[in-house]
Amino acid sequence: MPSATSSSGSFPPGFLWGSATAAYQIEGATAEDGRTPSIWDTFSHTPGRVENGDTGDVACDHYHRRADDVRLMADLNLNAYRFSVSWSRVQPTGRGPAVQRGLDFYRGLVDDLLAKGITPSLTLYHWDLPQELEDAGGWPERDTAYRFAEYAGIVAEALGDRVEMWTTFNEPWCSAFLGYGSGVHAPGRTDPVAALRAAHHLNLAHGLGTQALRSALPARARIGISLNPSVVRPLTPSAEDVDAARRIDALANRVFSGPLLHGGYPADLLADTAALTDWSFVESGDEALAHQRLDFLGINYYTPAVVSHTTEPDAPRTDGHGASAHSPWPGADAVAFHQPPGERTEMGWSVDPSGLYELLVRYGREAPGAALYVTENGAAYDDKPGADGTVHDPERIAYLHAHLDAVQRAVQVGADVRGYFLWSLLDNFEWAYGYGKRFGAVYVDFETQTRTPKSSARWYAEVAGTGALPGLPA
Ligand code: PNW
């Protein structure tokens, strides 16, 4: 277990100690200053899509509480903040000229951060496609990739003088396969071919977007992408289960790392999905376009996947990806997902820090020129304020400690990890689960919008302040 192999070294100099959020999950103010609906507004306002009928209409009201939230980060010793830009706040129809008031919000946020010595890390796309672009076909359509590149250029022109760390996409796997495959995320479509087309156009958009960023940004800017690679483990060492793991590795990981890191889709992925599509939507030159130099690779990690071969029609086809009759794994109907034994978070996700270590070592080798950042890691627990108003969350402290220890062990074997962004700064709108799942280091009372740092926030502040892991509290 983590404590037995615990490393007592410190983290590399200049290590970023951050927290992460996403626009739709915290901003609220969805109809202010010219913002128009994104696919998540439409989806959350469609009955039955999000638990409890929750929407991001108000969320953490961060749009109006930005300065307080930045002060909170500074109080917690954080030296970095990862946020995303709402595309439809900046370019309401997804095309054409920008709305200055939308850009002003992000410029103000960045200035508040810089004034506190906090490094801004900007993500252009965290799942909130302008609804107008979905109405025109969304990510399964090629044109959306060109629209993204135009939007990337607009944001780069506006903020390139003050933001150095740029991320094109957050977790394109979720956008493609949960959005268009299983339908548990917006826009809620359930078409396996649309999901594969979406994945390709997200890769293409990353390439085109990176080119647009490079031409608009100063040379010191660093450009990357955040993936949520799966750690895929076969249930048994049988050849059938090992092959099931290979299939999921192709659909979860190599569908992105193939073009982005190696310049092409893996042959086994094309073969596994041949009954669904001939991939003729991949035009000549697309894979080379997607293969841009990456200055950094963001790794988001929560839990591993355990899979087996199955012929049972009713075996679980997903693991922690929300309930749907439709699989997010096109062409992998013969794969079942299993819940590993042991500790779980409130999401039902098993706690296994060795998966983070494995990912950092794997991607350190696969992307040798790219710095690595853990751009998301964290856990949901059933947090409640005590009688004295404090929120005590020892499980989250143990989770963070074990995962930071895994980061440190990866660094010791040569992984070039430069920072860690805790998901999340605040309890927020947890997508299809609504406000019922609390990932924050800071507790949010959604009636009053009061923010209360949990004990994990105090613990993380100490780690960020000292740059080293303390002993675990008894
Ligand atoms: C990530 N899955 O979402 C997102 O980047 C965050 O916005 C989110 O709040 C956080 O993790 C916690 O869920 C994921 O089903 C959602 O594999 C679903 C999956 C993975 C990541």
Image (cartoon, rainbow, N blue to C red):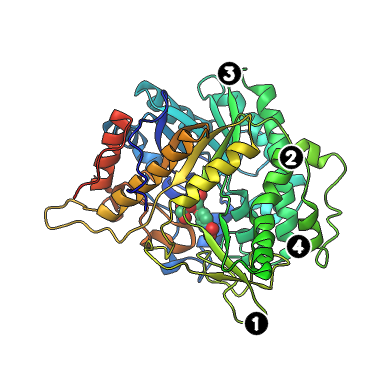
Does dot 2 land on a helix, a strand or a loop?
Answer: helix
- What separation in Å lies between label 4 and label 3 (alpha carbons)? 39 Å
Q: Which sits in the foreground, 394 or 173?
A: 394
Does dot 4 land on a helix, a strand or a loop?
Answer: helix
Query: Which amino acid type corresponds to the residue marked 1 in the rendered image?
Result: Pro
Question: What residue does disc 2 label?
Answer: 262
Question: What residue does disc 1 label?
Answer: 313
Q: Residues within 10 Å of mark 1 (few under 14, many from 20)?
A: few
- What separation in Å lies between label 1 and label 3 (alpha carbons)? 53 Å
Say whether residue 329 is visible: no
- What separation in Å lies between label 2 and label 4 (alpha carbons)? 23 Å
Question: What residue does disc 4 label?
Answer: 193
Query: Which amino acid type corresponds to the residue marked 3 in the rendered image?
Result: Arg
Cβ of mark 1 under 8 Å from ligand 1: the answer is no
Q: Which sits in the foreground, 35 or 10?
A: 10
Q: Position of residue 108 (x, y in %)?
A: 43, 28
Does dot 1 land on a helix, a strand or a loop?
Answer: loop
- What separation in Å lies between label 4 and label 1 (alpha carbons)? 21 Å
Q: Earlier in the sequence, mark 2 or mark 4?
A: 4
Q: Earlier in the sequence, mark 2 or mark 1?
A: 2
User: Nearer the viewer's eye, disc 4 or disc 1?
Assistant: 1
Does dot 3 land on a helix, a strand or a loop?
Answer: loop
**Residue contact between numbered discs 4 and 1, judged by CB atoms under 8 Å:** no
For residue 215, above or below residue 40: above
**Res. 430 mark:** none
Q: Position of residue 311 (x, y in %)?
A: 67, 80
Q: Position of residue 24 (x, y in %)?
A: 48, 49
Cβ of mark 4 under 8 Å from ligand 1: the answer is no
Question: What residue does disc 3 label?
Answer: 220
